[in-house]
Amino acid sequence: MNGEKVLVTGGAGFIGSHLVDALIELGAKVTVIDARKPKKTYKNESAKYKLMRIETEEAHIFVKKMKPAFIFHLAAHIHDRESIHEPVMNAENNIIGTLNLLEAIRAQKNVRFIFASTGGVIYGNQDDVPVTEQAEPRPLTPYAISKLTAERYLDFYRSTAGISYAALRFANVFGPRQDSSAESGAIAIFTAALLKGDQAFINDDGETTRDYVYVKDVVRAFLLAAEADYSGVLNIGTGIERSTKEIYAAVQEVIGTETGADTREEIKDVVRRSALDASLAEEEINWEPQTAFEDGLRETVDWYNDHL
Amino acid sequence: MKICVTGGAGFLGSHLVDALIERGDTVIIIDHLKKDKPRFINKKAVVKDYAISDERLASFFEEEQPDAVVHLAAQISVSASVEDPLKDARTNIIDSLKLLEHLRPLKGVRFIFASSGGAIYGDTKIVPTPELKDVAPISPYGISKQAFEYYLESMHVTHGLSYFCARFSNLYGPRQLVTPGGEGALIPILIKKIIKEETVSIFGDGSASRDFLYISDAVNALMAAVDSDVNGTANIASGKEVTVLEAWEVVQKIHGSNGNVEYLPKREGDIHRSLLDSSRAMELLNWESQTSFEDGVRNIYDWQKENLSIL
């Protein structure tokens, strides 16, 4: 990565800002495209920030001129539940935005494209958990459909334009800087509520399971995928299912509080169980999760303690 | 019934509109009516020259309260989608989604979508091909059609949308136009060439096969889908495999004399065999193809002879 021209879309966000820090650390020349400005505390002074939306002509022209050696594409509309009510907006961001970038580099040689995809909702409800990449996709929300469709376009550009890519299907990413006011991100939401003394809510019956992967492990997956030749999809997760109730109890324990949560049974989780088998990522890019859940959780709580 | 047909002035759309009017339905054609190719408009239909993404459709649907919308308007060229995937996605995904959004406030509207078997299945080894789900289409056209199928299923699960998705095989029949490059329109090309005494180019040895479905059979399937309340996706196909050479034999027989053929090297990316299993359509819609290949070809031959000027 040292001295390489690197583009990070969505580099002002939660995962993107951690990735930008790691890339700068490695000596990369990083340009960020994001629809929003980075918060002061996340802004990396060694990176360039361009305020633009990826689905625009402006972004297309910019990327075409830039000719990056690596593109980390994280900019997206990421709210699954909201996408059910705003499918057009979600598709314009996630499908048209991705196509717009791919068209910009179609004629370019030697570019490696790393796409932030999603594991949980692309697979939907499966009998065998943890799921492998062999499972039949069952996307049930516009968000999931947009990510799966973007993956399919990536494969079209691989076969016709020779663009080398990895689509990383992430489990539920958590860690410092995660937005605690969004519709998802149980750890961020619970931590913020308990530290601020706000009422916390557990959706559905609390038995819904997710696979929680720490943001530093995710950043390492991006970097390993960038250096590898593998083209295709890869699960990035721990393979461990944790229920919403368990997550709440774990956050309570780290913070040292007994404050309970109310339940909101009327908010149903479309996907009931989710965990990803990441053996292919181990095989292809030598990635496996390294952070113990408790350690990641402690670092996360410490960060919210300092930043709320 | 009151039925809106997007793309209702095109090849498949105009035949559907004629059949719906024939059986007494009220039909509204929603079609941009661009003059770059001939359009076929039934005079008894109401015509709205709106693009499917037009914001005015929201209030139009609210006023009209259609019972069903048959969505046929699309970017339909595979090669154009390879050339410009963004344009294809804007029409087949974004604009189609906007159309669905305009319909969301309506209660109980039935939505029928014309998808494509061939483009979604690609060169699958499973022949005859059933309704495979876990396939990654090769072309942007296949990807966009499949994406919209996923959206329909999602809208069914999350908003209770009533829908049916017809994965057609290769349609042929009167009013089918020979587009530049001749993509997907083998039968009218063969007929046009033999009538004009031009040489037919066959790529490969002529053993490539397709599942040709006659237009009125396709129309019957769409009407069965409108009338049904089944939600789902089914292949709409003849279930019969016809090779390029067999098709050429039939065309020559109907024309009454032999034409000239040149054999050219096989084109890369051409699908060799395409044959769809349409038994699910029988189960779900009680529909199956009725027209023999020879009868179908005779009908389109007669139409082309009378309409050579627009081809």
Image: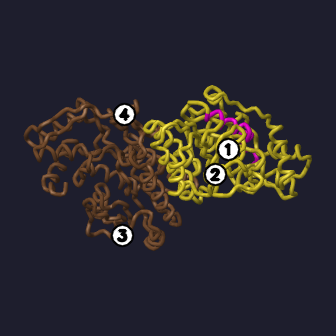
Chain colours: A yellow, B brown
| Between marks 3 and 4 in the image, the one whose residue lies nearer the viewer | 3
Residue depicted at x 16% and y 47% = B192
Question: Residue B190's spot in the image, x, y percent?
Answer: 18, 43
Is A213 one of the magenta-colored residues?
yes
> Residues under labels 2 and 3: Cα distance?
36 Å
Which quarter of the rendering shows the N terminus of chain A?
Answer: top right
Q: Are marks 4 and 2 on the same chain?
A: no
Q: Chain of mark 2?
A: A
Where A99 falls versus B110 (above or below)?
above
Residue indicated by mark 4: B128
Query: Are dots 1 and 4 in contact, CB under 8 Å?
Result: no
Which label belongs to residue B242?
A: none
Residue indicated by mark 1: A272
Residue indicated by mark 3: B48
Question: Residue A167's spot in the image, x, y percent?
Answer: 58, 39
> Residues under labels 3 and 4: Cα distance?
40 Å
Residue ranking furthest to the top: A283
